Image (spheres, coloured by chain):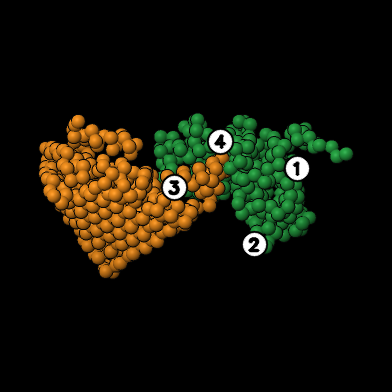
Amino acid sequence: MTAWPNLFHRPGHPDTGKPVLLGVAGLRLELEGKRILDGLDLELLSGEIHGLLGANGSGKSSLAYAIMGCEDYRPGAGEITFDGRRIDGLPMHERARLGITLAWQEPARFEGLAIRDYLRVANPKTDVESCLKRVGLDPDEYAARAVDKTLSGGERKRVELAAVLAMQPKLAILDEPTAGIDLLSLDALLAVIEALRAAGSTVLLITHQAEVAAHADRASQLCGGRIVCRGETASVLEHYRKRVCKRCDGRTCHV
Amino acid sequence: MSDFEPLYDLFATAGWTPPPIPEAAHVVAYGHRLASTQSLAGVRVEAEATDTGIEARITIAAGTRVAQPIHLCFGLYQQFGVQNVHLALTLEPRADATVWAHCLFATPLAARHAMQAEVVLMEGAVLRHQEAHYHGTSGDIQVIPHTRASLEKDARYLADFSLIRGRVGRLDIDYSVNVGEAAEAELTSRIYGFGSDAIRIREQLKLDGQGARGLVKTRVAVRDDARAEVLGMVEGNAAGARGHVDCMEIVRDRAEVSAVPEVRVRHPQAKVTHEAAIGSVDSRQLETLMARGLAPEEAVDLIVRGMLA
């Protein structure tokens, strides 16, 4: 007789004992006939900052879109579980309602939508002023401005981070959050990530910059649609920097 | 019953809060019945009802800065009827005013409203003209707002037409503005059509004077079986003239839009640009809002409302 699966069992990670918040197993994704993710496995532990390293084109953003449930990024095979529940059949907004969100590398702009209203989309009771201050934007100057093309790239990224803070997600996927942000505000960005962690969020920090990933608790390196190295951040960074990828022999793993 | 009570009922039906019309300079007319007019210092309002419509003349004296908006309130509270309005609006040199036009048709079943406006802005005059329409929920109405405007040197004309609540019915907008030396005109239209609504917009700026500037901006969203034709035209006819046509339309369901940004340049030192975007809602915008937990229809609604805001 086959035993019923225990739907409420959330196994802890063998090394840390922390529960697994997000599990990705054997994920395959093809776009226009090209394999982007090739049997990818990944586990994110509850409350951790997890760095996802990889060169341009390695599949980092595609993985983010597949986890979030973007329409064109439906995996051909594999499973995604979140908080003990399989989610790969759920539409995007239902995944968001479970507590997953994504900050795009190049966030969309919205004509006529005020920043304060944008921050309240996920949580009408959010403290707009506090969220804007945390990302270094003066609420008096920005709350009433539109999320449109009058914002610079860096301002728009900060608004996006403020929106993620406002949502208080269980899992925040930040896709290249430093792209387009000047060095002076890198510290502010890292403070936002810490604020997310302090509020109980798990963060998947996608980057191709080793110095950004260095702030993660654990990290994984992606190459050719697969995780080729995972573990403590220091050891993954060492692997990343030494170009010893078994999959590509270091030829395409680096920027 | 005061002359304003039917108007307040129309405002309530539209879901709007009526502004303090009795204290301001105004013209209020129901169909071809003139309900109220008022002049103020520097603002001369003359109006009469004739067999064929309402004739109104508003003249703002030179140098007058009108503190309160001037109200033009036209509408029908019956289901059937015709309203023709002829408006001559003149701002003498350096006059500065805001006009709020409210055109309210709460329960039309076979109604027609036609506005023929002639607007003259003399040297240095500034006019902000905001025109908000509510046409009820039946769609059985034809509305024809036509405006001819001329701007003398250094004048500014900012016109904003909005019809974003209730049905449109059949709408035929035709604006044409001659822009003189160093003068500036902006025409903005924001319209949301659904059901079997039919929208036609023709807006034309002729940048005739040296250094004239102009913008034609249309924002139209349609769904169901609605149709829209948008023609934004800017002519650069003088040295230093700068113009731009900006059309954005969102189309859903079986609705259809054609948008033509037409630019003409007749002087080598004039420059006119255009941009037009028609299509369904941008997928990145949609996904961004869905990643915050909005269902697709909620996300589309928010994007459309933002575009029309």
| Numbered badge on residue A231 | 1
Q: Identify the residue at image location x=38%, y=61%.
A: B259
Q: Which residue is disc 3 drawn over?
A: B304
The CA span between labels 3 and 1 is: 45 Å
Question: Is B250 in front, or is A206?
Answer: B250
Chain under disc 4: A
- N-terminal of the pair, mark 1 or mark 4, is 4
The amino acid at mark 3 is: Val
Chain under disc 1: A
Question: Is B108 in front, or is A167?
Answer: B108
- N-terminal of the pair, mark 2 or mark 1, is 2
How many residues crowd mark 1 within 10 Å: few (<14), some (14–19), many (20+)? some
Judged left or right of residue A153, residue A240 is right
Chain that the image shows in green: A
| Numbered badge on residue A167 | 4
The CA span between labels 3 and 2 is: 31 Å
